[in-house]
Image: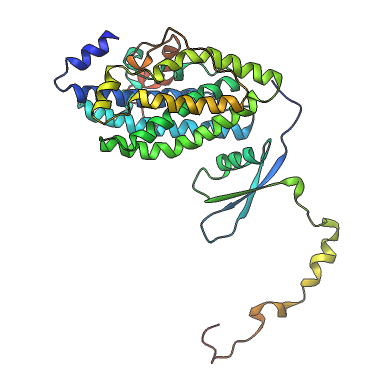
C-alpha cells in the first residue's frame, strides 16, 4: 500500500500560553490542513506545550535569499545607537 | 452468559456486583484496545500516525488504570490495577469483542476505532451524569480524550472511504467484517438494565439511536455502505470472547506471569 506521492510539508507554530505569541516548533507531513493540525497536535503538544496551533504550508513561506544576507543584515552591525542600552539614563528617571 | 447472571443475582449486593462487572467492562475495553493500538508503534504508515495511534493508546490505558483501580476497590479483595490487568485469564475479561479483533491493515484499525470511539463517546458523555460519583469523575476526564479519538478515526474513515478505489474497498470490507461485533455495544443485558434503573449507567436503548446516528453520518460522508444487521451476536462483555483475546493477553501478560512482581 505504499504510495509514491509524499504528503506536503506544513510548518507548525505553537502558542505556549494565552498571551504569548505563536512560535515555530518544526514541521509535519500531512495530506491537508485538517490532518496537519492533528499531526502537529500529536507530534508537538503531547507534553502540554501549547494551547493553540497554526500550520502553514511550507511552500507558502517566502524566505530571504541567503546570498543576499550580507546586503540585508550586515549594515545593522555598526548601528549600536539603535539599542536602547546605548543611551545613558539620567538618574532622575526612575521608571523607564 | 448464565454465569454472569448467577454471579450477579447470587451476590449479597446485586447492584454492587453489577457495578463491579460494568466497571470491568469499560476498563477492559480500554485496556485491550490500548494494547492493540500499541502494536502499531514502529509500524504505522507515517511517523505522525505512529505518534497519533500511540497517543490514543496511552489515553486508553490511562482510562483503564482509573477504571481497574476502581474495580479493585469495589471488589474489595485487595487486587489493584496491575493484578486485574496482568493476572486475570481471558474468560475473566469483559471487554467488547470488537476491541480484541486484530489490527489488520491501517484501514481496518481505523474502522474498529471509529465504531468504538463513537460508542465510548456516548457512554462517557452519559456517565458524566452518573449517580456513581467516581464513575462520573472518570468519565469527565475520558470524554475529552474520546472526542479527539473520534475526530481522528472519523477523519480517517472519510479519507479512506472517499479516497481511492482500493482504500474504499479495504475499509468497506473491514466494516462488513467487524459489524457483527457491534451488536453487543447497543444490546442491554441484565447488568446494563439494573445499573440503568439506578441511574448509574445510561440505558443502552437510549444510547443506541445516538450511536447509530453518529456512525451513519460518518459512513455517508465516507461513501460507505452500512452493513445489514446480523442475527448472531458476540458477547465479550459477558466473558465470551473470540479466539484473538488469548493471544493478546499472552503477549500483554507475559512479563508479570513469567516474573511475578517484576518492576522496572
Residue B212 screen position, x and y as percent: 47, 24
Residue A64 appears left or right of B162: right
B195 and A78: which is toward the camera? B195
Residue B70 screen position, x and y as percent: 28, 31
Q: Residue at x 53, y 35 (%)?
A: B151
If the image is split into quadrants, where does the C terminus of chain B sit?
top left
- Asked whether the viewer can see residue B260, the reply is yes
Q: Residue at x 33, y 31 (%)?
A: B67
A67 and B137: which is toward the camera? B137
Q: Residue at x 26, y 38 (%)?
A: B133
Q: Residue at x 57, y 24 (%)?
A: B219
Above or below B95: residue B198: below
Residue B143 appears left or right of A35: left
Residue A83 screen position, x and y as percent: 68, 77
Above or below B68: residue B10: above
Residue A62 appears left or right of A52: right
- Asked whether the viewer can see residue B83, the reply is no
Residue B42 appears left or right of A64: left
B53 and B227: which is toward the camera? B227
Amino acid at each position: 500500500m505504499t504510495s509514491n506521492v509524499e504528503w506536503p510539508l506544513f510548518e507548525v507554530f505553537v502558542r505556549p500560553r494565552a498571551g504569548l505569541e505563536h512560535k515555530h516548533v518544526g514541521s509535519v507531513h500531512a495530506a491537508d490542513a485538517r490532518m496537519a493540525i492533528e499531526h502537529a497536535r500529536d507530534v508537538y503538544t503531547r507534553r502540554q506545550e501549547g494551547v493553540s496551533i497554526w500550520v502553514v504550508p511550507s511552500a507558502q513561506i517566502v524566505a530571504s535569499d541567503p546570498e543576499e544576507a550580507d546586503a540585508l543584515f550586515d549594515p545593522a552591525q555598526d548601528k549600536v545607537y539603535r539599542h536602547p542600552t546605548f543611551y545613558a539614563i539620567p538618574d532622575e528617571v526612575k521608571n523607564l | 452468559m448464565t454465569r454472569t447472571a448467577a454471579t450477579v443475582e447470587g451476590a449479597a449486593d446485586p447492584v454492587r456486583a453489577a457495578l463491579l462487572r460494568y466497571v470491568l467492562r469499560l476498563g477492559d475495553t480500554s485496556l485491550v484496545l490500548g494494547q492493540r493500538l500499541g502494536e502499531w508503534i514502529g509500524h504505522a504508515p507515517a511517523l505522525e500516525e505512529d505518534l497519533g495511534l500511540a497517543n490514543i493508546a496511552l489515553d486508553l490505558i490511562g482510562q483503564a488504570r482509573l477504571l481497574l483501580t476502581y474495580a479493585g476497590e469495589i471488589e474489595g479483595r485487595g487486587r489493584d490495577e496491575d493484578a486485574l490487568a496482568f493476572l486475570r485469564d481471558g474468560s475473566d475479561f469483559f471487554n467488547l469483542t470488537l476491541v480484541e479483533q486484530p489490527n489488520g491493515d491501517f484501514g481496518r484499525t481505523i474502522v474498529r476505532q471509529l465504531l468504538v470511539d463513537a460508542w465510548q463517546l456516548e457512554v462517557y458523555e452519559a456517565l458524566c451524569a452518573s449517580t456513581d460519583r467516581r464513575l462520573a469523575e472518570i468519565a469527565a476526564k475520558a470524554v475529552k480524550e474520546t472526542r479527539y479519538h473520534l475526530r481522528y478515526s472519523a477523519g480517517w474513515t472519510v479519507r479512506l472511504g472517499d479516497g481511492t478505489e482500493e482504500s474504499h474497498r479495504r475499509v468497506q470490507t473491514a466494516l462488513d467484517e467487524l459489524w457483527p461485533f457491534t451488536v453487543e455495544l447497543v444490546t442491554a443485558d441484565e447488568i446494563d438494565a439494573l445499573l440503568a434503573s439506578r441511574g448509574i449507567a445510561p440505558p443502552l436503548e437510549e444510547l443506541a439511536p445516538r450511536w447509530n446516528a453518529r456512525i451513519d453520518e460518518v459512513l455517508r460522508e465516507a461513501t460507505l455502505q452500512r452493513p445489514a444487521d446480523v442475527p448472531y451476536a458476540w458477547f465479550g462483555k459477558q466473558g465470551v470472547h473470540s479466539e484473538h483475546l488469548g493471544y493478546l493477553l499472552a503477549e500483554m501478560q507475559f512479563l508479570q506471569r513469567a516474573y511475578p512482581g517484576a518492576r522496572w
